[in-house]
Structure formats: structure tokens, C-alpha cells
């Protein structure tokens, strides 16, 4: 079938088989050779062997110049395998790919590098792998080095490069091709923030004359970058359409059931931890100025937390912290003995009582969840949820998460 002149890429009934055993492919090949010797047709891929499975199947879509297609799905859905088949790194077992012009794949940017060679040498090696001849690489060499910002390091072995330097070099070589089709797998976060913005600006320049296929777990990238998106689930294409709707479809698969309030809170507060060999008899709760336990407090009131425990050993640098979130899972603030220099000196088998005082609670009316965390330096000894705390509304309106004390000074000229 001929490629539609308006399209850069057409995928028709594409499928890829994998096997759980290394010998499976050889067995299928051997059976097909025997069948062909006896004049019989090849073994149909619909007749899977016991250890074979579809990485993906029945994939159909087309892509025009200037379009960007997102591919999303849960882990194991077949996204990266699809991209590798489109890039020619893997052969499909079913279907057809029709493509126009040059393509460049940014799947594993550092694949194919020779670690003992210099960056300069690897530009020529990687460029040749991407289909450029020596003259074309020479024409683009200075631009590649400048874009990568490697400077004199270009003449040192890349075994001495950091992972960020390797990624910058690989991206710079790939982007210099200016392809008609770019296949991108989770690399729009390459490098530091400034270099990432430069990469995104370069990709934006190519949008008018190239087509893109982007695989990403970042739903924000899919919505911001792509014109369309497909959703893969267990190797099948279950959606093809607007990115916002694709993201909703993906999130419904990721969270098939609406989690309960307790489950949402537990997700925010995890992980919980208790090293009972090092600490015991831990008690912690919110209380008021009279020492009574409370689960509710008025805006502006003083709040206390009491923590009691017994250490089984003598810690070197004991730190107590209380991270605080609202009930929607937004991190609000945290309290820590390490932050204000309140050291805790305790010996083995000694019981300790620690009191946290918040002189004036300026958290806006809402429900708040928190953990109590006890560390010896970097080592976590205990981490558990505190009782839920509710801040009551007063007569004044509130905005946002917290209130900040302030005052207005108003002056005007007398008439």
C-alpha cells in the first residue's frame, strides 16, 4: 500500500511478539523453514506457542508533518517496544510501517557510545549510526559541540563524563540531523533546567517541518506537547484522540476505583516505620494548654503536640520532625528540632518527653494530616501518623492554605 502524501508515518495493524524463553524465536524460525521446504505457508502468528505473548498488537494510526502524537499507558503496556519497532531497532511480527523522509530516535540516547573514545570521536561514530556521512558530520560538528556545551571536554574520553554530559552530547548529535520524524522516549527532561529549556526550544523549531511520537509518563508533557495521544493497555490501543481525554483514560486505568478517604491519607503519609529494637513506648498526640488531647482547634489558638518514647541505645544526633499536609495531600509546612537548633540529648533506656508548641495557629480552616518522624542523623527510627487535626472557622473569610499576619496603612490627601 502506498503512503498518503500528506502523511509522514502510517502504521497498519502492527504487532510484535515476545517469548519468555530465548529458544522460542529459533523454534518458530525452524518450523517456518520446514513448512517452506514442504511448500506450506508460514506459521501464522495467531498460533502462539506456549511461551509467546504479544507485546502489542493491532496498532493503527497515521501522522502528518507538524503533528505530535503522545503514547501513554501503564508499565508493560508496550510503549517503548512500539517506539523501538517504529525506529527499526526491532522487526514487527505483523503489520506494516510506511514512512517518508528521515527519522531519528531518542530512545536510549547513550546507546552505541564507545566509552574509551573521546567525545569528538563519538560524534562521528554516533552520526554514522544515524545515517550521516563524514562530510555531513563535519558540517554539523561545530554546531553539535556548541549546543552540547562540552567545550574542551569534547577531546577527553567520554568515560570521564558525568551522566548529564553524556545525555547532552547524545541529544546534540541526534537533534543535528533535523529529521522528518522524531521518536522520543522520556528524554524531554534531559540535563539541567536551563539546558532542558534549550532542548525544548530546538524541538519547537522542528515542529513546523517534522512529526513527533512521544512516549512519556508525564501527563503534563503529553498535554502540553502533543496534538493527539493514544493509550495502550496490555498491548492493545484502547484510545486515540485528544490528549486531555487520553490522560483521563490513562488515569482511570491507573486508578480503577476511587480510593477511600483513609486510603488517600495513607498514600500521602507513607511510608510508616518503627524500629522496635531501637525505640519503644512511643506515644504522640495533639493537646491544648490544659494538656487535654484534641482533634480540633480554633484559628489563632495555641497548639501543642506531646511525644513520649524510650530509647534502647544512645543516639548521636536525634531529630524529631512533624511534616504537615492538608487533606487534599498538599504539603503545607513542617516542624523540626533540627531546624531551630533544639538538640535532644538522650541516653540508652532513658525515657524522653518532647513538646512541640505552635504559639498561634494560622492554618486556614481545614482538615490536616501529619506524621511524627524520629531520626538519628539520616537513619529513620520511627515514622507514624499523628491524629487528624481540624482547624475551625472563625468569623473572617480565609483564602488559600494559611494566613499571614499583616496590616494595611491607608493615607489620602485631604480635600
Image: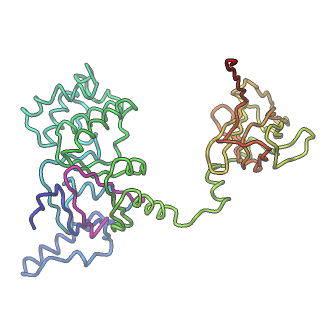
Range shown magenta: 56-75
- Residue 114 versus residue 255 in the image, above or below: above
- Identify the image quadrant of residue 164: top left
- For image coordinates 78% across by 39% down, the residue present is 312
Q: Nearer the viewer, residue 276 or 265?
A: 265
Relative image position of residue 306 (x, y in whole percent): 83, 40
Relative image position of residue 242 (x, y in whole percent): 36, 59
Q: Nearer the viewer, residue 153 or 409?
A: 409
Total count of labels: 0
Relative image position of residue 78 (x, y in whole percent): 33, 61
The N terminus sits in image quarter? bottom left
Relative image position of residue 256 (x, y in whole percent): 52, 66
* 8 drawn magenta: no
- Residue 386 versus residue 94 in the image, above or below: above
- Residue 244 versus residue 13 in the image, above or below: above
- For image coordinates 77% across by 48% down, the residue present is 389
Horizontal side of 9 relative to 382 (left or right) equals left
- For image coordinates 8% across by 37% down, the residue present is 133
The C terminus sits in image quarter? top right
Horizontal side of 383 relative to 230 (left or right) equals right
Q: Nearer the viewer, residue 240 or 59?
A: 240
Magenta segment's dominant SS is strand
- Identify the image quadrant of residue 179: top left
- Residue 306 versus residue 231 in the image, above or below: above
Horizontal side of 237 relative to 102 (left or right) equals right
Q: Residue furthest right?
A: 290
Identify the colour scheme used. Answer: rainbow
Q: Residue furthest front?
A: 415
Horizontal side of 146 relative to 3 (left or right) equals right
Q: Nearer the viewer, residue 219 or 337?
A: 219
* 74 drawn magenta: yes
Amino acid at each position: 500500500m502506498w503512503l498518503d502524501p500528506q502523511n509522514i508515518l502510517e502504521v497498519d495493524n502492527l504487532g510484535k511478539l515476545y517469548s519468555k524463553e530465548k529458544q522460542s524465536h529459533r523454534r518458530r524460525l525452524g518450523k517456518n523453514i520446514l513448512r517452506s521446504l514442504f511448500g506450506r505457508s508460514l506459521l501464522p502468528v495467531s498460533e502462539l506457542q506456549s511461551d509467546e505473548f504479544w507485546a502489542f498488537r493491532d496498532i493503527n494510526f497515521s501522522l502528518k508533518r507538524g503533528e505530535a502524537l503522545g503514547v501513554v499507558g501503564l508499565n508493560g503496556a508496550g510503549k517503548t517496544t512500539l517506539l523501538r519497532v517504529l525506529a527499526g531497532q526491532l522487526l514487527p511480527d505483523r503489520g506494516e510501517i510506511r514512512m517518508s523522509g528521515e527519522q531519528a530516535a531518542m530512545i536510549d540516547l547513550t546507546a552505541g557510545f564507545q566509552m574509551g573514545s573521546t567525545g569528538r570521536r563519538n560524534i562521528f561514530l554516533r552520526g554514522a549510526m544515524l545515517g550521516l556521512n563524514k562530510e555531513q558530520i563535519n558540517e554539523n560538528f561545530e554546531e553539535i559541540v556548541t549546543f552540547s556545551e562540552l567545550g574542551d571536554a569534547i577531546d577527553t574520553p567520554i568515560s570521564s563524563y558525568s551522566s548529564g554530559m553524556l545525555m547532552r552530547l547524545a541529544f546534540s548529535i541526534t537533534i543535528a540531523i533535523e529529521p522528518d520524524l522524531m521518536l522520543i522516549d522520556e528524554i524531554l527532561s534531559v540535563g539541567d533546567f536551563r539546558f532542558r529549556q534549550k532542548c525544548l526550544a530546538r524541538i519547537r523549531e522542528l515542529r513546523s517541518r517534522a512529526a513527533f511520537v512521544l512516549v512519556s509518563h508525564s501527563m503534563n508533557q503529553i498535554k502540553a506537547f502533543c496534538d493527539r495521544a493514544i493509550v495502550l493497555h496490555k498491548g492493545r490501543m484502547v484510545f486515540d484522540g485528544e490528549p486531555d481525554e487520553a490522560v483521563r483514560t490513562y488515569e482511570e486505568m491507573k486508578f480503577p476505583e476511587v480510593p477511600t478517604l483513609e486510603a488517600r491519607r495513607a498514600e500521602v503519609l507513607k511510608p510508616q516505620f518503627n524500629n522496635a529494637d531501637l525505640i519503644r513506648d512511643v506515644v504522640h498526640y495533639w493537646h491544648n494548654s490544659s494538656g487535654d488531647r484534641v482533634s480540633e482547634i480554633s484559628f489563632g489558638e495555641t497548639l501543642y503536640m506531646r511525644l513520649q518514647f524510650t530509647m534502647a541505645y544512645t543516639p548521636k544526633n536525634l531529630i524529631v520532625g512533624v511534616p504537615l499536609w492538608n487533606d487534599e495531600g498538599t504539603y503545607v509546612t513542617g516542624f523540626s528540632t533540627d531546624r531551630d537548633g533544639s538538640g535532644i540529648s538522650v541516653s540508652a533506656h532513658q525515657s524522653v518527653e518532647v513538646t512541640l508548641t505552635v504559639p498561634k495557629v494560622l492554618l486556614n480552616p481545614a482538615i490536616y494530616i501529619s506524621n511524627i518522624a524520629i531520626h538519628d542523623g539520616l537513619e529513620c527510627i520511627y515514622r507514624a501518623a499523628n491524629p487528624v487535626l481540624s482547624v475551625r472557622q472563625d468569623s473572617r473569610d480565609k483564602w488559600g492554605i494559611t494566613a499571614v499576619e499583616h496590616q494595611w496603612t491607608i493615607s489620602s490627601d485631604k480635600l
